[in-house]
Amino acid sequence: MRTVIFDLDGTLADTSGDLIAAANRCFVAMGAGPQLDAKADAGTALRGGRAMLTLGLGRMGALSEAEVDRWYPELLRAYGDDINSHTVMYPGAVDAVEALRRAGYKVGICTNKPEGLAQNLLVSLGVRDLFGSLIGADTLPVRKPDPQPYEAAVLQAGGAVAQSCLIGDTATDRKTARAAGVPCVLVTFGPGDEDVRDLGPEALLHNFDDLGGVVAGLIG
């Protein structure tokens, strides 16, 4: 019944390159050049499509909520059309998940990426079968940091919320774990632009080689 739920973007995989490429295709379609840099803006990419559009439109001097709303579906289409040209699983992630499964843990994913895109990406990466659950931004009427998607991910994986923990990389994940009343582990190796140490997680993960020990120390 022990369960480990992972965030996807910035936690299991660095998806920022493909996200930024999709956003830049939108800016080109608007008649401007690419507005985002794959390295400098990676942290914004992992906050989602609206964050990227907001940043790029702001740089163009064309920022408005209406423009963000208008281009968001186009960004999702562009991303879905080319979802895995640059994305990579973080070193050791697959081995660490497989080790948890061998040790008897249930594992799943709770992400704020739309479920269909998350499903397609995981299949493309060849790792979908590792996870007993997948809850996306649009699976339920609410998304993280509301605790319901997390709880659904635990139950879908066959686990119990009281014996679970969340592995993530942002304040959203920290808030989700707090709302669900479960321990939170935040990774320190993603390209996010916030200092996760200041978020007060129950543990930090510097390397996936350490995941088993960290999880055992939190939920047994």
Image (tube, rainbow, N blue to C red):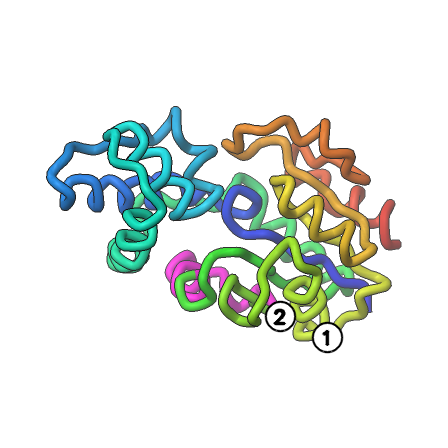
Main secondary-structure element of the magenta-colored stretch:
helix
| Residue 97 belongs to magenta span | no
The x and y percentages for residue 207 are 65, 35
Q: Are marks 1 and 2 in contact (CB under 8 Å)?
A: yes
Is residue 129 one of those drawn in magenta?
A: yes
Earlier in the chain: of badge 1 and badge 2, it is 2
The CA span between labels 1 and 2 is 8 Å
Residue at the image position 39 percent from the left and 48 percent from the top: 49
Q: Nearer the viewer, residue 188 or 33?
A: 33
Q: Secondary structure at mark 1?
A: loop
Q: Secondary structure at mark 2?
A: loop
In the figure, is residue 29 to the left or right of 69? left
Name the residue beneath numbered marker 1. 158
Crowdedness near tag 1: few (<14), some (14–19) or many (≥20) residues, C-alpha within 10 Å:
some
Q: Position of residue 187 (x, y in %)?
A: 64, 37
Query: From the viewer's perspective, is residue 203 above or below residue 80?
Result: above
Work out whether residue 82 or residue 55 is closer to the camera in this orientation and state it: 55
Q: Amino acid at mark 2?
A: Gly
Along the horizontal axis of the image, is 214 left or right of 48?
Answer: right
Snapshot quadrant of residue 38: top left
Residue 180: quadrant of the picture:
bottom right
Most foreground residue, 29 or 80: 29
The amino acid type of the residue labelled 1 equals Gly
Q: Quadrant of the C terminus?
A: bottom right
Using a 10 Å C-alpha cutoff, classify the residue at mark 2 as few (fewer than 14 neighbours), some (14 to 19) or many (20 or more).
Answer: some
Q: Which residues are magenta?
A: 118-132
